[in-house]
Image: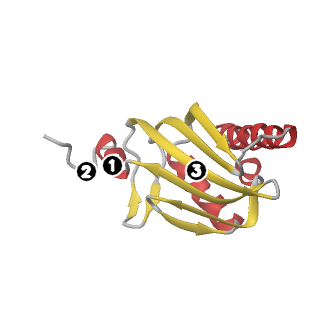
Amino acid sequence: MAVTLQDKKTYVSNSAAVKDSIVSFTKGALDESVALYADDAEVSDPTGKYKGKPQILAQLKVWHTAFPDAKADVTNQLTEGDQVLTEVTFRGTHTGPLAGAMGITAPTGKRVDLSMAIVNWFRNGKIQRERAYFDLAGLMQQLGIAPTKS
């Protein structure tokens, strides 16, 4: 398949948009972070499924409330067509309540270091679908609320 100049511009634009969204999250600019998503976008991650900008924004607020000092470093990105795969290292201190399916986890004060892979599918310049992969059990172990492996 031959890649055109327009394809290259789209690849770069989509990759940059994902990075910008991640940077906006770490700055606490959650409205900016979610602006990249289509109104009917769908996001899936180990904590659940979220449809539409309001649900996606609500989930970003959950994470930012729990980890207000969060930093996310993009360590790798691959782009093909309308898909962007981004590897991210997420670091932060659990100083706020973390709301989840099992209730609210009180702040532990513990630092976490979490590797993630995020796959985004773009349509008309917006994220239409996102799948994020990370070790939720490992995160709970780092927070001291799940048993560690022996």
Tell whether 140 sits left or right of 31: left
Tell whether 54 sits left or right of 6: left
Mark seen at residue 146: 2
Q: Residues within 10 Å of mark 3 (few under 14, many from 20)?
A: many
Q: Amino acid at mark 2?
A: Ala
Between 129 and 56, which is closer to the camera in this rendering?
129
Q: Amino acid at mark 1?
A: Met
The residue shown at (18%, 43%) is: 149
Mark seen at residue 119: 3
Q: Amino acid at mark 3?
A: Val
Closer mark to the observer between disc 2 and disc 3: 3
Q: Earlier in the sequence, mark 1 or mark 2?
A: 1
Residue 143, percent from left and from top: 34, 43
- Could you tell me if the residues under marks 1 and 2 are in contact, i.e. CB atoms within 8 Å? yes
Residue 35, percent from left and from top: 77, 54
- Could you tell me if the residues under marks 1 and 3 are in contact, i.e. CB atoms within 8 Å? no
* Secondary structure found at label 2: loop
Q: Earlier in the sequence, mark 2 or mark 3?
A: 3
Tell whether 9 sits left or right of 56: right
Q: What residue sits right under mark 1 in the picture?
A: 140
Q: Is residue 84 above or below residue 27?
A: below
Q: Quadrant of the C terminus?
A: top left
